[in-house]
């Protein structure tokens, strides 16, 4: 075997090993930092697997569930699957100040974790920032808005063109 | 009428591109000479038709001709004129049209600037670039046609997306980014021509390098402006979130930067030819992939395919490109065999090789994290996103290693280094690094990564300044020149090297700013009653009331905040919330007080309707402004490096072969 061929094989081997190691580390890291995108019923159906994972929970702020304590900046509300009063819902607690347009009945996505006490602790709250900027028409279905929120909130800052 | 004219211009561009691509590639393959003038003419024609199509669209926007589909989609009589013109790139169809005119401009500039000496490559190069033009002209003519007719024409339109008419940066950021993205078509054409010819001569390499440096500079500026826009408009208190849209611009920048370095090894040592060419092809592929990711709506949901017509076209194009590039590399690659070798591990070429592996490694991990959600949704139907920690954990160590190499590389000579000399040269930079870290610790700063970054920044700065100034010092001593004359003359002797080091200094600024602003950030949020104050860092903020106002296209509400510093300075800040007529959501404008040591960032989150209270998000970002202020340094360096040489390069290489200390100083001169 010529020296140059041998050197090339060594280089190739080194690159393969380095690439393999990098892939291994990257994939391991990736697995630890996944954010799951679930609706309340999907999350509840996961059972134990939902605890501790980083989750983006998308739904509507249930009417009559909003509590806001400005003294301690503590916000709590229920995120429901839809507008029906008996829809599956999850209690969310957040220390974040709600943004101006946050209100009951609005589409919302909260990022955080769910624990065994049944409370979803959120550190990031995103309301329906729709990219559709037509004037709202009477009779607009809120469910449509909610679906839009769900798809957009997958990447909340991706509003660059 | 306008629609028909505009569409006609697009078809004209499509025809020119198709004709030029066929003639260029065809006569290139059969080695006939008559094709080149025709390919040139086709490039000029493509440019002219694209300018015409864009001019017609701008005219339609300005005259509020709502019978044109795109105008009906983004136009509005209430929008200020400047944002009306900008609407050209504020939605999908218009931005692809704008893309076309930039491609046309690049093609024109390239076709007219290339002389006879490259006649054997040029038909291939122009043909390839025009083939890319065919794709974009086809997109504009078909799936993303902005000139469709709306009948009956509506009386008014919704106006562009409020986010895009909220800040003046939106006027310059997209063109810069497009100039970077689209410009990568030119090096792609040059590289493909080299592969098709099966040779890569020195002059053609210089062409390749220069035509990569131009879009690279625009891309760098575009990325920084984009992060500045996110910081100044979105109001979430950051400038980079590893969002797919951001990654899309960052990925080709990484490979293009790797190319700019590897081409030096290629020119000096006649190795890494195939690698260098692959980086160019990869950069172009990543720009097309990035355009697909940002334009097709795939990142809101994979299912957006059904709504956006350009997704499948783009995927087909990416597929064709991939097959084309791989086939080309596999069948023609061996023609670009290395003629030299890297002899010593302790040399600049080895440092650059490691730098290249790092850049490609970072590209791979960022690409993996960006595409992973698409893959899982397509394969398993599971909707996930990859969190920021993944990207930070992968990219931060890589970035720190790159910073280290930015110091080591310029310090090592080409060929092989004398270990004793290296040790001597290492002394001052290492002392600077240790001193910096020591000072940081003394001032109470903690954290491994930020302190390591600051230390390495001092290390790199010391080495870079020495490399920049040493040639001037030699001139002062030997030729008795004044300091300024010596600096200018030494710089113009080896502009590429000098410019490159200036860029390095700018990059050091960015590294320091990122490390400081992300590691030592202070954040709080608070609801303040009228006349109440809050302290954050050295600042005291008092809420003194709301005020309202109206502009033609929006109303706004601002919270007046009196800011006082411990030093006694006072200033009135007014973070606002803007309400656009056609939008249901308010869009914030944070108030930023920028100083060289750090920014105070106040964003209005909510307010009581009676004006009695307001809620704020507050941040102090140390040194963050240096990220954007580094732009002039980067541009200056790139200009110095890319400026066309007045003297033939043969003279330059002779002069660098001088004796004694001059030859040592001139190592690395281009």
Image (cartoon, coloured by chain):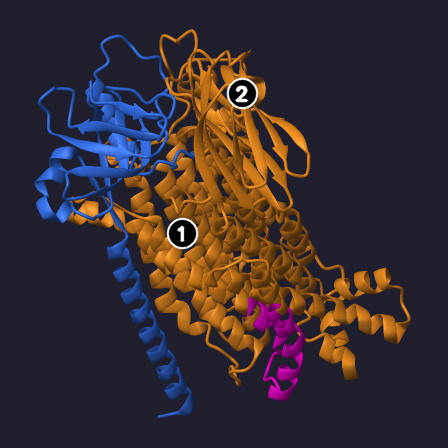
> Residue B7 versus residue B529: which sits nearer the camera?
B529
The secondary element bearing badge 1 is classed as: helix
User: Residue B472, percent across and down?
Assistant: 80, 68
Residue at coordinates 50% horizontally, 59% vertically from top-left? B446
- Which chain shows up in orange? B
- Quarter of the picture containing the C terminus of chain B is bottom right
Q: Main secondary structure of the magenta part?
A: helix
User: Residue B477, percent across and down?
Assistant: 87, 74
- Which chain is home to disc 2? B
Residue at coordinates 64% horizontally, 61% vertically from top-left? B500
- Which chain is home to disc 1? B
The secondary element bearing badge 2 is classed as: loop
- Which chain shows up in blue? A
Q: Is residue B6 left or right of residue B626?
A: left
> Residue B405 versus residue B259: which sits nearer the camera?
B405
Q: Is residue B412 above or below residue B30?
A: below
Mark 2 neighbour density, 10 Å: few (under 14) some (14–19) many (20 or more): some
Q: Which mark is residue A12?
A: none
Task: Give the distance between the C-alpha atoms of the residues marked 2 and 1, in whole angstroms.
Answer: 53 Å
Magenta region: which residues? B405-434
Q: Is residue B443 above or below residue B658?
A: above
User: Residue B522, percent across and down?
Assistant: 49, 44
Res. B664 image quadrant = bottom right
Q: Is residue B571 above or below residue B489?
A: above
Q: Which badge, 2 or 1, comes first in the chain's sequence?
A: 1
User: Residue A133, percent across and down?
Assistant: 37, 19
Q: In the rendered structure, does residue B416 fall within the stretch colored magenta?
A: yes
For label 2, the residue is B531
For label 1, the residue is B286
Q: In the rendered structure, does residue A144 fall within the stretch colored magenta?
A: no
Mark 2 or 1, which is nearer the eye? 2
């Amino acid at each position: 075997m010529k020296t140059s061929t041998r050197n090339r094989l060594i280089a190739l081997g080194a690159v393969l090993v380095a690439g393999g190691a990098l892939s291994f580390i990257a994939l391991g890291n990736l697995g630890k930092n996944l954010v799951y995108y679930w609706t309340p019923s999907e999350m509840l159906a996961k059972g134990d697997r939902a605890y501790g994972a980083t989750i983006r929970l998308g739904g509507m702020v249930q009417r009559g569930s909003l509590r806001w304590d400005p003294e301690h900046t503590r916000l709590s509300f229920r995120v429901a699957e839809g507008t029906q009063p008996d829809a599956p819902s999850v209690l969310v607690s957040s220390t974040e100040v709600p943004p101006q347009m946050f209100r009951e009945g609005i589409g919302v996505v909260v990022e955080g974790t769910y624990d065994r006490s049944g409370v979803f602790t959120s550190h990031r709250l995103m309301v329906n920032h729709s990219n559709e900027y037509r004037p709202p028409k009477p009779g607009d279905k809120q469910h449509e808005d909610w679906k839009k929120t769900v798809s957009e909130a997958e990447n909340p800052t991706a509003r660059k063109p | 009428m306008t629609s028909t004219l505009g569409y006609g211009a697009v078809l004209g561009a499509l025809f020119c591109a198709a004709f030029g691509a066929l003639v260029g590639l065809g006569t290139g393959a059969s080695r006939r000479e008559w094709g080149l003038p025709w390919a040139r003419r086709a490039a000029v024609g493509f440019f002219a038709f694209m300018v015409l199509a864009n001019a017609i669209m701008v005219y339609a926007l300005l005259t509020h001709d709502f019978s044109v589909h795109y105008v009906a989609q983004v136009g509005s009589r209430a929008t200020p004129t400047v944002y009306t013109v900008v609407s050209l790139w504020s939605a999908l169809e218009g931005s692809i049209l704008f893309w076309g005119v930039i491609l046309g401009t690049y093609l024109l500039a390239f076709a007219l600037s290339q002389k006879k000496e490259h006649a054997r490559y040029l038909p291939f190069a122009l043909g390839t670039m025009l083939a890319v033009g065919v794709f974009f002209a086809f997109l504009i003519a078909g799936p993303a046609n902005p000139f469709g007719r709306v009948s009956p024409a509506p009386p008014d339109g919704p106006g562009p997306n409020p986010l895009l008419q909220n800040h003046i940066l939106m006027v310059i950021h997209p063109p810069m980014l497009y100039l970077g993205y689209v410009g990568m078509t030119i090096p792609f054409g040059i590289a493909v021509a080299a592969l098709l010819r099966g040779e890569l001569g020195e002059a053609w390499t210089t062409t390749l390098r220069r035509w990569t440096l131009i879009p690279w500079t625009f891309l760098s500026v575009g990325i920084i402006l984009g992060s500045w826009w996110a910081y100044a408009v979105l109001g979430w208190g950051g400038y980079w979130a590893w969002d797919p849209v951001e990654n899309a611009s960052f990925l080709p920048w990484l490979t293009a930067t790797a190319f700019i370095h590897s081409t030096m090894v290629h020119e000096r040592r006649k190795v890494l030819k195939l690698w260098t060419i692959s980086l160019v092809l990869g950069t172009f592929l990543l720009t097309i992939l990035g355009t697909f990711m940002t334009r097709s709506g795939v990142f809101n949901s994979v299912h957006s395919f059904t709504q956006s017509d350009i997704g499948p076209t783009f995927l087909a194009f990416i597929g064709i490109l991939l097959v084309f590039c791989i086939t080309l590399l596999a069948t023609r690659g061996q023609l670009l065999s290395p003629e030299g070798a890297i002899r010593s591990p302790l040399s600049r070429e080895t440092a650059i090789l490691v730098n290249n592996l790092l850049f490609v490694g970072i590209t791979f991990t960022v690409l993996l994290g960006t595409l992973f959600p698409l893959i899982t949704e397509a394969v398993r139907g599971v909707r996930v996103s990859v969190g920021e920690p993944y990207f930070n954990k992968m990219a931060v160590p890589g970035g720190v290693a790159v910073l280290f190499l930015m110091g080591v590389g310029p310090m090592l000579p080409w060929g092989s280094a004398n270990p004793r000399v290296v040790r001597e040269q290492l002394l001052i930079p290492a002392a600077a690094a240790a001193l910096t870290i020591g000072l940081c610790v003394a001032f109470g700063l903690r954290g491994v990564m930020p302190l390591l970054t600051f230390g390495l920044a001092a290390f790199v700065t010391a080495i870079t300044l020495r490399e920049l100034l040493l040639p001037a010092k030699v001139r002062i001593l030997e030729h008795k020149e004044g300091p300024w004359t010596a600096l200018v003359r030494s710089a113009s002797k080896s502009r590429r090297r000098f410019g490159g080091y200036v860029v390095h200094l700018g990059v050091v600024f960015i590294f320091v700013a990122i490390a400081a602003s992300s590691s030592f950030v202070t954040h709080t949020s608070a609801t303040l009653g009228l006349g109440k104050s809050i302290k954050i860092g050295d600042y005291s903020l008092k809420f003194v009331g709301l005020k309202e106002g109206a502009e033609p296209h929006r109303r706004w509400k601002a919270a007046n905040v009196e800011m006082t510093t411990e030093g006694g300075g006072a200033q009135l800040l007014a973070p606002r919330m803007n309400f656009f007529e056609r939008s249901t959501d308010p869009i914030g404008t944070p108030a930023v007080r920028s100083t060289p040591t750090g920014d105070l960032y106040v964003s209005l989150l909510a307010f009581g309707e009676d004006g009695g209270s307001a809620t704020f998000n507050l941040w102090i970002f140390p040194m963050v402004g240096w990220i954007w202020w580094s732009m002039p340094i980067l541009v200056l360096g790139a200009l110095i490096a890319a400026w066309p040489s007045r003297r033939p390069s043969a003279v330059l290489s002779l002069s660098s072969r001088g004796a004694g200390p001059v030859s040592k100083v001139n190592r690395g001169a281009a």
